[in-house]
């Protein structure tokens, strides 16, 4: 019998809303902030622009500004991008919020709890082995063993017995990977 998987199933990890930010409030010490609908503030300073993304404490509503661009010459902006900042384009809000550079510069991490889902084909009743390819539409950090257990409705021990994976199972990742569900006797 061949052990080559004959079925390839796609799984997709994607966000269902914007994640919260783990960011300490200077007023109430809460560690959770939200972008809400998402608003930028653009401030002209001569021929240079500052752009901030506004976030608000989920406990006390205090607004803080995350630096997106600092003193950048107006002419070096892509006009479409600049327009996006002025109209609070939701796609631009998402792409800036999810950009690791913004998180590093403003010292926050993203809290993805309840903000994402795993889309899987309805059933996994094909003859095994089955190859599953996991793709990430959004950079949600997941532990492969937990994701696979959730998607296959197995315990993590069963996952260890029934699958082989091309990356370490315990290390969180946001990069696509593949695993094979082996035949069980
Ligand atoms: Zn607060």
Image: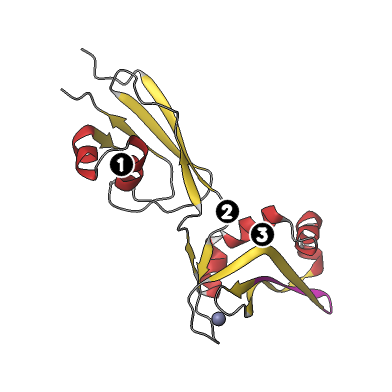
In the figure, residue 86 lies in which quadrant? bottom right
Q: What secondary structure characterizes most of the magenta part?
A: strand
Looking at the rendering, in which quadrant would you find the N terminus? top left
Mark positioned earlier in the residue sequence (3 or 1) = 3
Work out whether residue 74 or residue 100 is closer to the camera in this orientation and state it.
Answer: 100
Residue of label 1: 149
Residue at point 35% right, 17% down? 6
- Residue 182 versus residue 42 in the image, above or below: above
102 horizontally vs 1: left or right: right
Horizontal and vertical percent position of residue 81: 75, 57
Mark 3 or 1: in front is 1
Say if 16 sits above or below 161 in the image. Answer: below
Q: How is the image coloured?
A: secondary structure
Between circles 2 and 3, the one closer to the viewer is 2
- Residue 132 in the image: x percent, y percent? 37, 31
Mark 3 surroundings: few (<14), some (14-19) or many (≥20) residues within 10 A: many
Residue 9 x, y percent position in the rendering: 42, 27
141 magenta-colored: no
Pointer 1 local density, CA inside 10 Å: few below 14, some 14–19, many at least 20: some
Q: What element carries label 3?
A: helix
Direction front: furthest residue? 59
Q: Which structural element holds mark 1? A: helix
Which residue is identified by label 3?
93
**Region in magenta:** 45-54
Residue at position x 39%, y 26% in the image = 123
Q: Residue at x 24, y 27 (%)?
A: 182
């Amino acid at each position: 019998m061949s052990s080559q998987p004959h079925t390839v199933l796609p799984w997709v990890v994607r966000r269902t809303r914007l994640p919260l930010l783990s960011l300490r409030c200077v007023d109430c010490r809460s560690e959770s902030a939200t972008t809400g609908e998402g608003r930028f503030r653009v401030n002209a300073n001569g021929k240079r622009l500052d752009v901030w993304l506004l976030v608000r404490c989920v406990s006390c509503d205090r607004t803080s500004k995350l630096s997106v661009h600092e003193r950048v010459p107006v002419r070096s902006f892509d006009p479409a991008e600049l327009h996006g900042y002025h109209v609070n384009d939701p796609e631009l809000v998402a792409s800036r919020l999810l950009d690791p550079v913004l998180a590093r510069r403003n010292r926050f991490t993203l809290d993805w709890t309840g903000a994402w889902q795993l889309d899987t084909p309805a059933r996994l009743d094909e003859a095994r082995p089955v190859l599953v390819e996991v793709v990430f539409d959004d950079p949600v950090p997941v532990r492969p063993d937990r994701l696979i257990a959730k998607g296959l409705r197995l315990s993590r021990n069963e996952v260890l017995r029934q699958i082989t994976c091309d990356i370490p199972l315990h290390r969180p990742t946001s990069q696509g990977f593949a695993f094979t569900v082996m035949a069980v006797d």
